[in-house]
Amino acid sequence: MITVTDLSKRFKHHQVLNHLTLSFPSGTVTAIIGPNGSGKTTLMKCILGLVAPDTGDISVDRLGLGYMAQIARYPENLTAREVIEMIAGLHPDRTPVSTQQLVERFGLQQHLEKPMRALSGGTRQKVGAVIAMMFGPTALLLDEPTAGLDPVASERLKDLISEIRDQGATILITSHILSEIQELADRVVYLHEGSVLYSGDVDSLLAQTGAPTLSKAIAQMMGAPDEVAS
């Protein structure tokens, strides 16, 4: 489980997060959504420990935390294999549980000896997926995880996300592909100007808005946010 309590963050004169209190249960996938500038990325970075909040507390097992960035930065001169091994070496107290299986699942075998600078964006995403999942995370944060992936790799990644959830992990995901969110997510947190506009399960959101799909529910919320209670 991940919990945040009274979390606030301001950048200069912009209040990015406004006293957020949220709980993300184990064994669930929660989608964090909202318009640009709503605080989604800042919330994720606070949970990761990359941004220090001004106020509030965060409870998360960072030793069991996996993270897949939308655009990951790796040493360009290292091969994919060397990058994976380097990350594994940074955590000597943790044993990779499924690296080879993940490599095969994403079809990376033929790319392992290539330098990162020679890999396409989609292949780099696959490397990022292996790194995020190779320790058997108890919490997994995914930022636009299918961006750049081909349809086959995208489906394999979604299958893995579901499997890791079923093993009891807490999973947070951001994505602009709302059909993907409806397919994967059990719960939704909708942020608007740094505040929580809605936090609950997907079915309740559909019932509350009267919308037939998540995309229509979100469009309704973005068009008239004050009409949707948290």
Image (tube, rainbow, N blue to C red):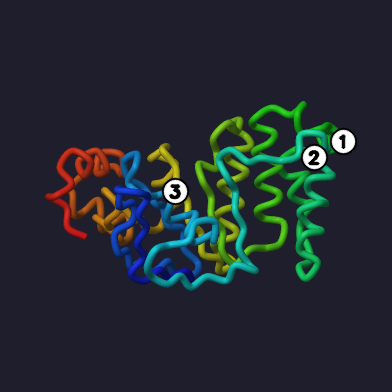
* Residue 196 at x, y percent in the picture: 28, 58
Residue for point 69% across, 27% down: 120
Q: What residue is at 45 percent from the left and 47 percent from the top?
A: 174
Q: Nearer the viewer, mark 3 or mark 2?
A: 3
Is 153 rendered above or below residue 63?
Answer: above
Give the residue furthest to the left.
Answer: 227
| Residue at which label 3 appears | 41
Q: Looking at the picture, tell me which residue is in the foreground, 196 or 136.
A: 196
Could you say which is closer to the camera, residue 17 or residue 113?
Answer: 17
- Residue found 39% across the figure and 63% down from its top: 54
Tag 2 residue: 80
Could you tell which of marks 1 and 3 lies nearer the N-terminus? 3
Amino acid type, callout 2: Ala
Q: Position of residue 212 (x, y in %)?
A: 24, 43
On the image, numbered disc 1 is attached to which residue? 113
Question: The residue under label 3 is which amino acid type?
Answer: Thr
Residue 92 placement, left or right of 52? right
Query: Is the residue 137 above or below the residue 214 in the image?
Result: below
Give yes or no for contact between labels 3 and 2 (Cβ–Cβ under 8 Å).
Answer: no
Residue neighbourhood size for the residue with mark 1, other residues' Cα within 10 Å, grouped as few (<14), some (14–19), many (≥20): few
Look at label 1 and name its amino acid: Glu
Asked which secondary structure carries label 3, the reply is: helix
Image coordinates of residue 106 in percent, x first then y, are 71, 41
- Marks 1 and 3, Cα distance to the nearest angstrom? 33 Å
- Disc 3 to disc 2, C-alpha distance: 26 Å
